[in-house]
Image (cartoon, rainbow, N blue to C red):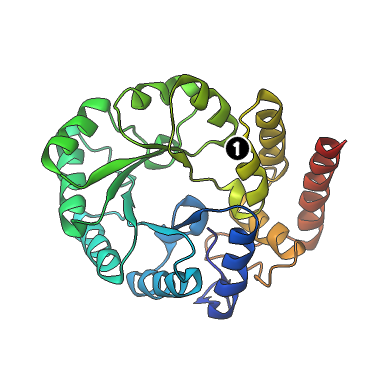
Amino acid sequence: MLTPLTDGGERLDEAAFGPMIGFLLERGADGLFVFGTTGEGINLDPEERLRALRLAREALDGRGDLLVHCGAQTTRETAALAADAAEVGVAGVAVIPPPYYPLTDRELEEHLVSAANACAPTPFYIYTLSDRSGYPVSVPVVERVRERAGNLAGLKVSETPFERVRPYLALGLPIYVGSEPLIAEAVAAAEIAGSVSALASVFPEATRALLDDPTPERAATVGELRAAISHQPLIPTAKAILRSRGVPINHDVRAPLLPLTPEQAEAARRRADEVLAAAAR
């Protein structure tokens, strides 16, 4: 889920949460994953994250599951965010490895166990995206966290290509695939729990259709649609296109991110429309 902002990205746009979440649910989303890579969570203050989480929970109103990403730079802040999320009452807490310092396996294990313990008994998910964290979560680390944290419930795996996803599928844990073009391949290899999808923050119906009918043709369309909105940075592009779809969300993003120019926004919308039109033929 995107995080609605206003005043040049300096404040939460509280009025936009309800309409945006309604749009997502009406078009096939089973629930929400807040403050992930698409949600700018790492750029928000802890107080903003807590306030936005409460707004999302209120707008969701029991119509689906609410998962929250609580990753932060330090273990202390990560654990505090995880504890806050559990107190609000969420269906799950997810944590990505802290970026910048490449942690050893032992350091990462301790970090993840601390986060899991902080939110227990709320279900805990490990979030793997080495393109953002800078290093992977090894399978042995996942296995050791599972031994020590009884609330480990699964993983959000946003790795690419598929060969980097495959080892996690053998763990016997629920897996949410993050890279939409890999959904069909993952389904063919093993049973997956679903997808936590950046594309679904704008086109939830496209990800929903692929999950319901994971054919190579649908996977190709979703890949083309994702590519169409990725010519410019994804978050401002997603906000611009979502607004063009009738959702009252501003183009604002938190600095150092920048919103798209009107010309860039129009070009992104046009590319996405062309993919959707071709798929409908």
What residue lies at 83% left-to-right and 49% top-to-bottom? Answer: 270
User: In the picture shown, does residue 207 fall above or below 48?
Assistant: above
Q: Is residue 188 left or right of residue 261?
A: left
Asked if residue 258 can be seen in this view, the reply is no
Q: In this figure, which residue is indicated by the disc labeled 1?
A: 212
Front-lying residue, 122 or 134: 122
Residue drawn at 72 percent across, 57 percent down: 241
The residue sitting at the left extreme is 148
What crowding class fits label 1: few (fewer than 14 Cα within 10 Å), some (14-19), or many (20 or more)? few
Query: Where in the figure is residue 7, as x and y percent of width and height?
Result: 58, 79
Q: Where is residue 10 in the image (x, y as percent from the top left)?
A: 51, 75
Say which element carries label 1: helix
Where is residue 62 drawn, in percent x and y? 44, 67
184 up-or-down from 115: above or below: above
Residue 9 shown left or right of residue 45 in the figure: right
At which x and y percent is residue 140?
21, 26
Is residue 159 something that shows in the picture? yes
Q: In which image quadrant can residue 251 be found? A: bottom right
